[in-house]
Amino acid sequence: MAEYDKIPGLSFKIYTISQTEARYGGIYLWTDRASAQSWFNPAWFARVEEQRGAPGEVRYFDVLTVTDSTPGGTPAASRSNAVAALITVPALAEGAARAAQLRATLTEAAEGRLREYTVVAEGLAGVVLLWRDQATAAGSLSDAWRACARQQLGAEPVVEWYDAPVLLPSALTSNGTAAQ
């Protein structure tokens, strides 16, 4: 974790392990895209491929809002039971409005939620959610929620599930998360 502790521009990292695929990595919250691109440079990609035997993959999302539900901010945890979900829907027009619509379908499912990012990327709107445990998360994204979201959004939400065994807020106050 020391490697990530004081990276300029990194506000929060969630170490992730996909629940459905043989993939692991992280969800990073950066203060700006330039900091992210500086970290994920050609040397990073070469190092990851050499160390892991597979090429690294990076998907960029612009973060519209950050909400941290933990008083004082979500603390570091090296043995977390947390789980994360990336939920996306197509955004053919205004991505920010579409992301807000998706976020609105999740407002009643806040119990046990640690952090939330409303995000957009080309052609997608989404929400990244971090819960304290799998049971809370699964209850939040029920079949009833899916049906409601599908009706309100006119599209099936795509949910990617990740175990989040390590949570790492930045140690640099200059990287402060907008969520606290």
Image: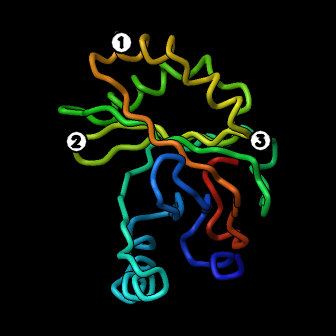
Q: Which residue matches tag 2?
A: 123
Q: Which residue matches tag 1?
A: 152
Q: Which residue matches tag 3?
A: 70
Mark 3 to mark 1 CA distance (whole Å): 29 Å
Mark 2 to mark 3 CA distance (whole Å): 31 Å
Residue under the point 78% across and 63% down:
78
Q: Is residue 54 above or below residue 138?
A: below
Q: Please, what is the three-letter code of the amino acid marked with disc 3?
A: Thr
* x then y, percent, for residue 11: 60, 63
Residues tagged 2 and 1 counted as in contact (Cβ below 8 A) = no
Residue under the point 64% across and 22% down:
139
Residue under the point 70% across and 60% down:
166
Q: Is residue 133 left or right of residue 37?
A: right
Circle nearer the viewer, 2 or 3: 2
Quarter of the figure with the N terminus: bottom right
Q: Please, what is the three-letter code of the amino acid marked with disc 1?
A: Gln
* x then y, percent, for residue 127: 47, 37
Q: Nearer the viewer, residue 44 or 64?
A: 44
Q: Quadrant of residue 46?
A: bottom left
Crowdedness near tag 2: few (<14), some (14–19) or many (≥20) residues, C-alpha within 10 Å? few
Element on which disc 3 rests: loop
Circle nearer the viewer, 3 or 1: 1
Please, which colouring scheme is shown? rainbow
Element on which disc 1 rests: helix
* x then y, percent, for residue 179: 64, 47
Mark 2 to mark 1 CA distance (whole Å): 18 Å
Upstream in sequence: badge 2 or badge 1: 2
